[in-house]
């Protein structure tokens, strides 16, 4: 049995603390229910509202959890820090916390990292102005993933394309969080890229 741990913000969290299985109602729960994950341990440690800085602080305070595969999905909450405060979060602080988190998670022998690209939709219209920040975060995450031998999974373009094809309201409830359909797309993307039972990553 392999141990799969998920870290991130509200998209990962999905009210997992209030749901009987502790996995929430989002893509993590759907991954755990998939037949390909039968017999595997899946844990959700997402936190609503977390930025990379908050994830870093949590790991320093609570310690780095042991797991065979750790998946992280975060970044969207760092954009309001850049846009609405006096802090210049992106790119320098974002890159700093990214490296620090990856360094902490890589200290456990045998742990493999999966990095999911943050995503943002085109509606409401103001989010279109945020896309350059998502692109910069994606560049930093991809580059850091390569440095640490982690698997980077692109999500932004795929999800926005599905929203255009199927309708925005079919994929996202507010331009950030996902509908059940959106969560199923994200879960299937993870399952396609990360082999169950501790096998090697499936890279393109």
Image (cartoon, grey):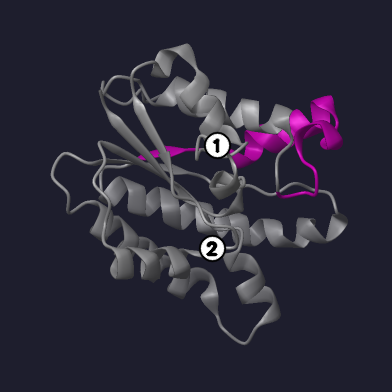
For label 2, the crowd category at 10 Å Cα-Cα, with few meaning under 14, some 14 to 19 and many 20 or more, is many
User: Circle 2 is placed at which residue position?
Assistant: 50
In the picture, which quadrant includes the C terminus?
top left
Location of residue 174 with respect to 39 vertically, above or below: below
**Residue at horizontal 61%, vertical 58%?**
76
Q: Residue at x 30, y 69 (%)?
A: 60
Region of the chain picked out in magenta, as a range:
151-176
As drawn, the residue found furthest toward the left would be 109
Of marks 1 and 2, the one in the foreground: 1
Viewer-side residue, 119 vs 77: 77
Image spot of residue 160 (x, y percent):
72, 38
Please give the name of the residue rendered at 38% of the width and 71% of the height, measured from the top-left corner: 57
Residue that numbered label 1 is attached to = 20
Q: Whole-percent x and y of residue 185?
A: 63, 26
Callout 2: SS: loop
- Check the image and report above or below for 133 versus 149: below
Q: Earlier in the sequence, mark 1 or mark 2?
A: 1
Query: Judging from the image, what secondary structure is the residue with disc 1 in?
Result: loop
Would you say 17 lies left or right of 129 here? left
> x and y percent of residue 145 in the render?
34, 48
Q: Nearer the viewer, residue 50 or 97?
A: 50
The 10 Å Cα crowd at callout 1, few under 14, some 14 to 19, many 20 or more, is few
Q: Residue at x 17, y 49 (%)?
A: 108
Q: Nearer the viewer, residue 107 or 20?
A: 20
**How far apart, in angstroms, are the residues tagged by discs 1 and 2?**
22 Å
Percent position of residue 203, x then y: 37, 25
- Which image quarter holds the N terminus? top left
Query: Is 113 on the left or on the right of 169, as rendered?
Result: left
Q: Quadrant of residue 48?
A: bottom right
């Amino acid at each position: 049995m392999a141990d799969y741990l998920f870290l991130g913000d509200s998209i990962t969290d999905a009210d997992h603390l209030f749901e009987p299985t502790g996995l929430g109602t989002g893509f993590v729960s759907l991954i755990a229910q998939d037949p390909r994950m039968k017999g595997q341990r899946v844990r959700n440690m997402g936190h609503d509202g977390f930025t990379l800085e908050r994830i870093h602080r949590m790991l320093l305070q609570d310690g780095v959890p042991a797991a065979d595969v750790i998946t992280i999905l975060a970044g969207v909450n760092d954009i309001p820090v850049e846009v609405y405060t006096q802090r210049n979060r992106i790119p320098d602080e974002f890159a700093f916390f990214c490296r620090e988190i990856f360094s902490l998670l890589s200290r456990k022998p045998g742990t493999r990292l999966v990095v999911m690209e943050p995503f943002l939709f085109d509606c409401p219209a103001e989010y279109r102005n945020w896309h350059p920040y998502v692109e910069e975060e994606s560049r930093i995450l991809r580059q850091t993933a390569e440095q640490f031998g982690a698997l980077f999974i692109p999500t932004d373009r795929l999800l926005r394309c599905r929203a255009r094809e199927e309708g925005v309201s079919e994929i996202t409830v507010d331009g950030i969080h996902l509908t059940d359909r959106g969560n199923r797309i994200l879960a299937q993307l993870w399952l396609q890229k990360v082999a169950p039972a501790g096998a090697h990553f499936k890279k393109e």
